[in-house]
Image (tube, rainbow, N blue to C red):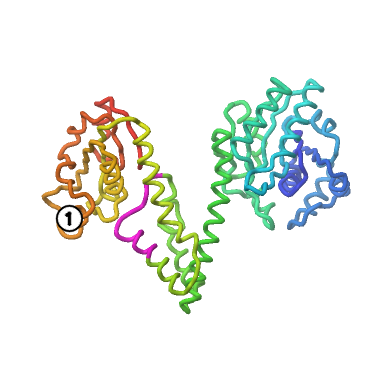
Amino acid sequence: MEITIVGLGYVGTVSAACFAAAGHTVWGVDINPEKVRIVNEGRTPIVENNLGEKIAQARASGRLRATSDLREALIHSEVSFVAVATPSRSNGDIDATHLLRACKQIAQVLMECDHSQIVIMRSSILPSVFEQCNEIFNATAPGRVKFCVNPEFLREGTAIEDFEHPPFTLLGVEDEQIEGTLRLLYKFIAAPVFVLSPQESLLVKYASNAYHALKITFANEIGALCQQAGIDGQKVMSVFCKDTKLNISTRYLMPGFAFGGSCLPKDVRALSYAAKQYDLEIPLINSLLPSNEKVVQRAVQRVCSSKFRRIGLIGLGFKANTDDLRESPFVELAERLLGKGYDLKIFDPNVSLAQLTGSNKEYIDKVIPHLSRLLVGSIDELVECELLVIGHRYPNVREFLRSVKIPLLELG
């Protein structure tokens, strides 16, 4: 294909070289004449492993050209990538000034040339900025631009390897014809292709980078705590990483409700206390319990905004297949709703007042002393509720929900 890449920064240059190496004809566009000159000389404007060789080969084959003339590139191309930098403002917001200007210029050229184009956002932007770009295309070049998203997941130092051997290719597109074109564009890459909406695709990139930052910070905090205790943190985290069933896996990584139980809250508190003993700050680990509490708070707010007063809560144990109520977030939710005067009924087939003993009974007596009148023995007793808050989906819940017309609030 004939491709234009607007922006010869890190992402744009690597993408241009790799697409050209795959057999596409690529026009790289940048307002910086020095970058254009360097690429046209067959050299790389950035430091990246093996990129210089890629660019030299692409220039020698005639499949890569650089220019500062946007019109010269767009008039030849079938698809265009926008790879303009999106730095942070002082308040943390994206500075999309250059990006929006580039979109405006693309739209103007396409309109003047009576040319249509698939324009693919490669830069990292939030959905709100995507909408701004879309508005520019619709207003300046109506009907000329088919706008979509293709986030990049390139790491500096291994960018070419990441481009050519990614874990997946992500397309943010809602048009089957455009999807087909993009699949052809990437057919040289042996990786699964996932198709989401443009907005969802953009957030996958942010979720990925935030998680990478989270992992690094977590490992460093555990390492600092180990160092203070005279323990080898490398050995601790090395064994930690051997658990690919829970630790390094997809477990616990889908949005749901707050954590609870007898282990997680207790052990997080213990780590926080240990750090205090060493006068050590571990802000990430210290933030876990407050962040978890916000999940319960948001659930209360959602119930309050519903304007319903008769609430049915399905699930009380901290997990679906247990009767353990210790530090259950659903117990906390029930307590808060009771405190706000809601008429509450609770169904949990694993929790029976007659069978509650030991720490579970003590916990219930202390936290929700009125549990005996709130628990119902059958889910059918929730039929008079105005809103059903679903924490766990027990075997007979789905059938009951099909038989009633009661609004649902899913938490799990």
Q: Could you say whether the residue bearing mark 1 is in a helix, strand or loop? A: helix
Residue 209 image offset from top left, x and y in percent: 58, 51
Residue 365 image offset from top left, x and y in percent: 18, 53
Q: Considering the image in quadrants, where does the C terminus appear? A: top left
Residue 47 image offset from top left, x and y in percent: 77, 57
Viewer-proximal residue among 257 and 121: 257
Viewer-proximal residue among 221 and 282: 282
Residue 232 image offset from top left, x and y in percent: 49, 76
Seen at 55% across and 55% down, the residue is 212
Tally the numbered discs.
1
Q: Considering the image in quadrants, where does the N terminus appear? A: top right
Residue farthest toward the left in the current orientation of the protein: 354
Mark 1: amino acid:
Lys
Horizontal relation, residue 253 to residue 374: left or right: right
Seen at 62% across and 48% down, the residue is 92
What are the residue bounds of the magenta stretch? Answer: 256-269
Horizontal relation, residue 158 to residue 405: left or right: right
- The image quarter containing residue 302 is top left
Callout 1 environment at 10 Å: few (<14), some (14 to 19), or many (20+)? some
Mark 1, residue position: 361
Residue 331 forms part of the magenta stretch: no
Residue farthest toward the bottom in the current orientation of the protein: 230
Viewer-proximal residue among 38 and 353: 353
In the displayed structure, 159 sits above or below 263; it is above
- The image quarter containing residue 3 is top right
In the displayed structure, 279 sits above or below 266; it is below
Seen at 37% across and 41% down, the residue is 299
- The image quarter containing residue 185 is top right
